[in-house]
Image (spheres, rainbow, N blue to C red):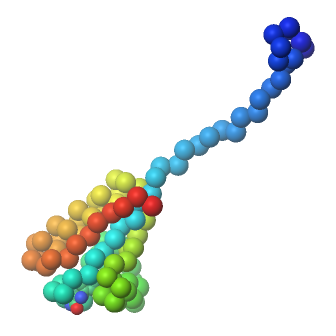
Amino acid sequence: PDDGDGDAGVVVQTRPKTKRPPLYKVLLLNDDYTPMEFVVHILERFFGMTHAQAFEIMLTVHKKGVAVVGVFSHEIAETKVGQVMDFARKHQHPLQCTMEKE
Ligand code: NFA
């Protein structure tokens, strides 16, 4: 109905905008000193990979310098990075793990 306000009853359809949280890539960086088996162990222990998956990703990091080892919410990504850095430090390896917004 036209109530005289000029819009003649126009209904503007809106879509329910559900905001998904941003995701973060967790990256593992190569270095010359951390033993390959230690990196494989980290990937099994903290990222739930099988031995074969872990070995494959470890080799990718070794050859290319860096690889994404998982994609998580900000809180989970921070936890993973902390777990890896703590474990590497405890074993006196220079392994580096970081996160970046996707
Ligand atoms: N480059 C390391 C080595 O030759 C192995 C490694 C792989 C380190 C992946 C860090 C990450 N011992």
Where is residue 7 drawn, in percent x and y? 82, 18
Where residue 80 appears, as percent x and y from the top left, is 30, 64
Res. 68 image quadrant: bottom left
Who's the residue at 40% across and 58% down the image? 101
Q: Is residue 84 visible?
A: yes
| Residue 66: percent from left, percent from top | 34, 78
Quadrant where the image shows the C terminus: bottom left
Along the horizontal axis of the image, is 15 left or right of 26? right
Q: Quadrant of residue 19?
A: top right
In the image, is residue 15 above or below residue 66? above
Q: Residue at x 10, y 72 (%)?
A: 90
Up the image or down, 15 lies above or below 55; here it is above
Q: Is residue 72 above or below residue 43?
A: above
Q: Residue furthest front?
A: 6
Who's the residue at 34% across and 53% down the image?
75
Q: What is the quadrant of the N terminus in the image?
A: top right
Quadrant of residue 35 in the image? bottom left
Task: For ligand 1, give the image quadrant.
Answer: bottom left
Task: Spot the residue most to the right.
Answer: 1
Residue 41 can be seen in this image = no
Whole-percent x, y for residue 34 in the image: 18, 84
Number of numbered discs: 0
Q: Residue at x 80, y 26 (%)?
A: 11
Residue 24 vs residue 34: left or right? Answer: right
